Amino acid sequence: MAGTAACGSEDRSGPAAENGLAGLSGAEVVARTQAAGAGATSVRMTLRGDSADGSETATVSAARNGDCTDEVAGGNPIEDGYNRQLRQTHVLRKDGRTFFKAGGLRGPGGPADQWMSTSSKEADQLATYCDLALGMPDELNTLTGGARSGQWVRDGSTRIGGVPAVVLHFTTEDAVDELALDTGPAGSSELRIAVAAEGEPQLLRVELASGSNRLTVRLRDHGAPVTVTPPPADQVHDFDAQLPVGEELSEG
C-alpha cells in the first residue's frame, strides 16, 4: 500500500517525543485524537483516492464557522487519457453561501470556468470535503466498518511534517469483521493512522487500502486562520435564480 509505506518511511530516525500518549492503548489514543479534533477551530486537508474508476485529489482549508476553500481534480485514466485537468471543481464557502466553478466540463451549456453561487441546503453536497476535513477524526469509526472484534494497535512512531507521531493500525480477529473493511474487489484491507505525539494529539494522517482502492488523507495546520475571498459579484451567477420554482439543486 503506497500510503502505508509513506507513513512508515517519512522519518524513523528516533522514537516520537510522547506527550501524554505514552502508555495509552490504541483505543485510548484514538479517543484522545477524536476529542482534540472536536476542539480544532480549523484544519487543512489534502486527500488522494485511487480506484479502478480513476483517481481524485482534493486540497481543503476548512474552519469551524463554515468558511472553506476546496479544490478537487479527478478523472478516469482510460476515458480521459490521463489528463486529470479535464475535470476540476473549485468551491468556496463564506458566510453560509457557496460559490462553485467546474472547469474542463465537456459539452456546451455547462458552468465550465464560470462562478455560480447558491445558499441552498443542497449546496452541502458540493462542499463534502469541507465537512470531511474537520470531521475526519470521527470518520475513523466509519472506516473501521463497525467491526466488533477489531482494535487499534500501536505500531511504532514516525514524523509527519516534522511532528513526532504515534502510528496505529486497525486489526480484526474475526474473518466476518475483516470483511467489513473490505469494500473493494478481492483482497485484504488495511487501515493505518498517525496521531501527533507533541502538543494536541491531532490526527495527522489516514491511510486506507481496500481491495484495489487506496485512500490517503493528510491533515495539518490545525487552528490556523482560514481566509476565503468570494469572487467579484459581477463574475458570479446566482444558481438559485436559474432553478424552476420548487426545484432544488440535486446531485449529479
Image: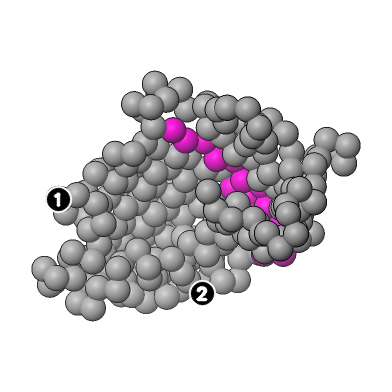
Residue 80 against residue 241 in the figure, above or below? above
* Residue at horizontal 18 percent and vertical 64 percent from the top: 179
User: In the depicted view, which residue is nearer to us: 135 or 27?
Assistant: 135
Residue 43 against residue 142 in the figure, above or below? above
Q: Is residue 62 magenta?
A: yes
Q: Which mark is residue 227?
A: none
- What is the chief secondary structure element of the magenta stretch? strand
* Residue at horizontal 35 percent and vertical 63 percent from the top: 143
Q: Is residue 223 magenta?
A: no
User: In the depicted view, which residue is nearer to us: 41 or 83?
Assistant: 83
Q: Label 1 belongs to which residue?
A: 186
The magenta stretch spans which residues? 60-75
Which mark sits nearer the N-terminus, 1 or 2? 2
Q: Residue 237, percent across and down?
A: 80, 42
The answer to whether one can see residue 240 in this image is yes
User: In the depicted view, which residue is nearer to us: 94 or 149?
Assistant: 94
Q: Quadrant of the N terminus?
A: top left
- Of all residues, the one furthest to the right in this rendering is 234
Q: Label 2 belongs to which residue?
A: 35
Q: Name the side, left or right, on which 187 lies relative to 49.
A: left
- Of all residues, the one furthest to the left in this rendering is 175
Q: Residues within 10 Å of mark 2 (few under 14, many from 20)?
A: some
Residue 144 against residue 148 in the figure, above or below? above
